[in-house]
Amino acid sequence: MTAPSYEQTVDVETPELVVLTYSIAGIGSRAMAAITDLLLVIGAFVVLGVIWFAVVATGGFGGFDLGGSWGIALLIIVQFALLWGYYVLFEGLMDGQTPGKRLHHIRVVREGGYSVTFGASAVRNLIRVLDMQPLFFYLVGMISVLATKRGRRLGDLVAGTIVVREDARRGAAVASAPAPATAEHASTLHTQLSEDEYVVLSRFVERWATLDGLKRAALAQQLAARLGTAVPDDGRPAGPRLLELHERERRARAGGVASRGEMGAGRERQALIAAGSPRWNAFASRLAQAQRRGLRSLGEEGVREFVAEYRALSADLARLRTASGGRALDELFQLGRLVAGAHNLLYRDRGMPLRATVRYLFTEGPREVRRSAGPIALAALLLFGPAIVAGVSVARTPTIAPQMLPAGMLRRAEDGVRRAKSGEGYIDDPQLFRPVMASGIIANNVQVTFATFAGGVTAGVMSVLVLVMNGVSMGSVVGLYASKGILPLLVAFVAPHGVLELFAICVAGGAAFLVAAGMLLPGARTRGRALVENGQRAIRLIGVSTMLLVVAGLLEGFVSPIEWWPIEGKLAVSGTTLVLLVSYLRGGRSVAAARERADDEPAATIHDAPSALALAPVTVPRAP
């Protein structure tokens, strides 16, 4: 039995109609896991830097000069991928656990107890930009964890995830419980204590080794007096007599004997525990193996047996929960953890193979862009509307440019007059460092769109500010160059990559407004459900935006700076990207139509249920 717990828990009903109880991970364990992961990321950065410097010092690797521009570009991309991909990849590949989470026995799961998907992990980790504020102190995230019912930070709210504990306390259910007593032996077993008395005695025995000798003796004397005739005075100290009583009571209960005064449900409870403990112990070992090595390690026949045992334990859990009458039991806790672990393993997401990734980007992505035309159009209005106003204003009144633009941009415009006259480009063509320029642009632009998306959690306020400010800055630059008569210089640089980059920014803004709409305009849905569903849609838009920004960054690094290309040639590149973009957005329409019809139907209760659950029926053993 167990004493009342102050753990924060959440109940989840499985497709088998069994209620599982998860313990919510607290701030302490989550903070330790986050610190561990941060140290691992920093360590990886250090190791990566040391390897890079070592290879450069030895003259390259396989004839490839890592000290040159391509090596630096590769280093930038790898560091960017490590910074943003660490959490998403580990949570997606390790069933909701990063190395830090695994070390501290916590796991990310979706509401309903299902395994976290790559999409859900991406949502919760991109919004980490806000959760970690101010700086990297995670004050926003901690406030959200404390303020929400299920201890969720902002990223969890949008992703529909919770972080649960997995360190199971080993009690009678999975410890070395004696085998059920035979009928002859059971007749010799009896209990002298009521259920409540046994709970008190069990708590005292658990604390026996931690108590001071004098305090332990005093408490033992008081408890012996309270239990009365169950602890006869034979001249020995009360402590040893209580330990003997506890062992007799434990063995009697393990043999299926109910507590004194228990009738009906109480007797059923003890019979269930006595009959089920050996099976539960065996299943705990098999579950641990499957969690470490995966279900495949069990073999085909082993998986069948695992599923059958899962069903049997689910039935045991339902019956034990009913028989417990609302009483907190160690056995109930342990059995719940076993069933929850198996449920999470059997219903885990199947990952994101290459075919699914391609479908995600080239079918679901374009479909979501078309479906989200309204939010994307709003983002475009907030970007280009201020840009037009600022551009016209600066072009007509160049004297206001210093109030609209930084000094560096003003100096570049002044130098642009000279460049236009001498036939040079917008900037020096960094032929040697084009790879570095491209990788730096990609990393910067993608991070900006991530921040724009995360701003949707602020009801879209932060995203509006980002779009408007960027629009004003962009328009002011165009107006300044127009006022100086050198606008073609700017257009020649921006044209090759501008279509993709500007559209990607609008798509990211549309993703942010989808999240904001889930908060502000849930419609007939609950606010929580609307936020999660819109977050799932929004992450598809971020996937599209990221892909477009990668292509735009390559064009901006390798094509845009070329000085000898005439403006007509660069405009041709711009037109080509526009045609390809339109073709991409029209892709997968036949498949998308079927999916859109499916999306209009109510969501299924079971997600990605494995075929193993459809195996042969299982016979659930009943307690004697």
Image (cartoon, grey):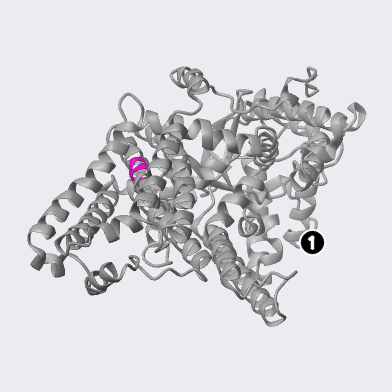
Residue 283 covered by magenta stretch: no
Name the image quarter holding the C terminus. Answer: top right
Q: Quadrant of residue 339?
A: top right
Q: Nearer the viewer, residue 271 or 408?
A: 408
Q: Main secondary structure of the magenta part?
A: helix
Does residue 326 appear in this view? no
Q: Position of residue 360 (x, y in %)?
A: 54, 35
Three-letter residue code for mark 1: Arg
Magenta stretch: give its range. 506-510
Looking at the image, residue 620 sits to the left or right of residue 569; the answer is right
Identify whether 463 is placed above or below 65: above
Q: Which residue is mark 1?
A: 236
- In the rendered view, tell whether residue 243 sits above or below residue 75: above
- Among the 4 quarters of the image, the one containing residue 2: top right
- Graded by Cα atoms within 10 Å as few (under 14), some (14 to 19) or many (20 or more), the crowding at tag 1 reads few
Q: Nearer the viewer, residue 110 or 9?
A: 110
25 displayed left or right of 342:
left
Identity of the residue drawn at 57% across and 33% down: 359
